[in-house]
Image (spheres, rainbow, N blue to C red):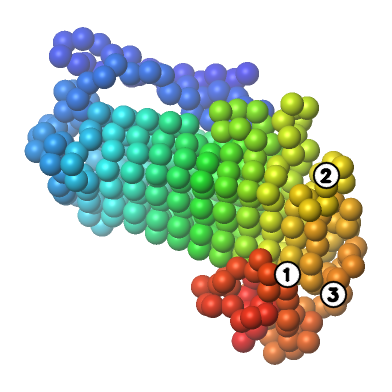
């Protein structure tokens, strides 16, 4: 167990409050854990700059907009705020926020700001809070040890990250530590990540849509197990219309790794209309659903991979735990309407398979074999129609990777035929 502690003294009405930020090992991963804080109204904390204290005092009951100044802004704290209407923190093009902590609060919106390090990691920390939105926020680290991260807690509810960007996330952490319930990640771009996961966690009611996740690679430390998404517990996890790119030194682009924890077993994992690309030598699997390491934890249930294009794997596009062979056939993972570029691991005895196209490797009854004739962006060409037309309609998503309404019957793969 590795523990990293940072202590910062905060003066509160003449008393000293000690805040401890702890990083603890969780398998090969580290996550930020929070200590408890006594309950104070935020504007009593001396650490907030005077202008922010005055603005919070103005809006803490009725809500309203706080316009942030230009240039570097020291870390801000929003504690025990439950306004009648949202408090909106609005940045300017040159605003650079060094971090933010939101605790025991509701209805907070942060927008139009860059979160960047100032001598140490820049962390957005949310706990015991609900209805929190990060919109048009750019989380931009500088290197592995002065990176960025958004850390959620199991008691968070209804957190939204939309039209955002993450780059150079903090070494050993995740760009987003997913916990709590009601997490929405929509139109978010993740790139240039070294020795960190992109999204990792155990949470309920998670939706990841229209996002681009790539470049989770080994860096100078080479000690992190890099996945683009690692699902440890909870559900549903719904992943739609997203692009998964290169990663290295990890298990998969989407790794389902059931663990015991407060979110419970993994259930209802749906990956639809998504594209998996990349050619890093150790990208053995694109999607990996493993057997739980703990015998008391069940296999992931309600797993479905439908209408995806997976051309990234060196060994198998999808690998499922052998133990699914012991599960009733109607409860096994559904693998339907996918383009699987390489599939050495047979799915026939561990999955329900319908009308997949296998370019190379093992196929199952009802699958099609051949070259899908995709263009450089993973989309079908005019030559693809014979192999990809007329997939299975039942259970197919309504839109393709680009948000266009699918034909009925749908094209096999993430993108409908032109």
Q: Secondary structure at mark 3?
A: strand
Residue 369, placed above or below residue 263: below
Mark 1 Cα shell of 10 Å, populated few (<14), some (14-19), many (≥20): many
Q: Residue at x 57, y 56 (%)?
A: 239
Q: Quadrant of the C terminus?
A: bottom right
**Disc 1 or 3, which lies upstream in sequence?**
1
Q: Picture coordinates of residue 393 (x, y %)?
A: 68, 74
Residue 407 visible in the snapshot: yes
Q: Of 349 and 402, which appears nearest the observer?
A: 349
- x and y percent of residue 394 in the render? 68, 69
Q: Is residue 120 visible?
A: no
* Front one among 200 and 194: 200
Residue under label 1, please give it.
Answer: 337
Which label is found at residue 368?
3
Marks 2/3 in contact by CB < 8 Å: the verdict is no
Residue in the picture at 53% in, 77% down: 404
């Amino acid at each position: 167990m590795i523990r990293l502690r940072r202590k910062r003294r905060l003066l509160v009405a003449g008393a000293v409050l000690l805040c401890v930020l702890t990083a603890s090992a969780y398998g090969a991963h580290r996550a930020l854990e929070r200590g408890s804080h006594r309950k104070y109204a935020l504007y009593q904390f001396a650490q907030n700059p005077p202008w922010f204290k005055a603005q919070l005092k103005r809006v803490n009951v009725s809500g309203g907009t706080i316009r942030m100044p230009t240039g570097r802004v020291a870390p801000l704290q929003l504690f025990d705020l439950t306004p009648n209407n949202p408090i909106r923190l609005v940045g300017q093009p040159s605003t650079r926020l060094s971090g933010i902590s939101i605790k025991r609060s509701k209805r907070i919106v942060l927008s139009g700001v860059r979160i960047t390090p100032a001598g140490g990691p820049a962390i957005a920390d949310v706990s015991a809070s609900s209805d929190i939105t990060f919109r048009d926020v750019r989380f931009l680290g500088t290197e592995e040890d002065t990176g960025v991260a958004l850390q959620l807690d199991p008691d968070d509810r209804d957190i939204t990250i939309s039209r955002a960007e993450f780059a150079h996330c903090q070494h050993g952490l995740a760009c987003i530590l997913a916990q709590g319930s009601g997490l929405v990640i929509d139109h978010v771009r993740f790139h240039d990540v070294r020795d960190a996961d992109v999204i990792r966690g155990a949470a309920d009611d998670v939706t990841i849509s229209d996002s681009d996740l790539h470049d989770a690679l080994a860096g100078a430390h080479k000690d992190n197990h890099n996945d683009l998404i690692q699902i440890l517990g909870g559900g549903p996890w719904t992943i739609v219309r997203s692009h998964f790119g290169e990663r290295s030194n990890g298990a998969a682009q989407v790794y389902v790794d059931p663990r015991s924890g407060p979110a419970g077993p993994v259930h209802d994992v749906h990956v639809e209309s998504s594209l998996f690309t990349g050619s890093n030598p150790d990208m053995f699997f694109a999607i990996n659903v493993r057997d739980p390491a703990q015998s008391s934890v069940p296999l992931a249930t309600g797993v479905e991979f439908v209408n995806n294009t997976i051309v990234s794997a060196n060994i198998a596009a999808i690998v499922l735990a052998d133990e699914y062979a012991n599960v009733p056939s109607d409860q096994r993972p559904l693998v339907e309407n996918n383009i699987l570029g390489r599939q050495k691991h047979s799915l026939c005895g561990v999955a329900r398979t319908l009308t997949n196209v296998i370019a190379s490797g093992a196929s199952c009854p009802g699958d099609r074999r051949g070259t899908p004739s995709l263009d450089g962006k993973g989309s079908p060409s005019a030559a693809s129609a014979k192999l990809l037309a007329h997939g299975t309609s039942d259970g197919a998503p309504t839109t393709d990777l680009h948000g266009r309404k699918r034909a009925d019957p749908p094209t096999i793969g993430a993108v409908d035929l032109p």
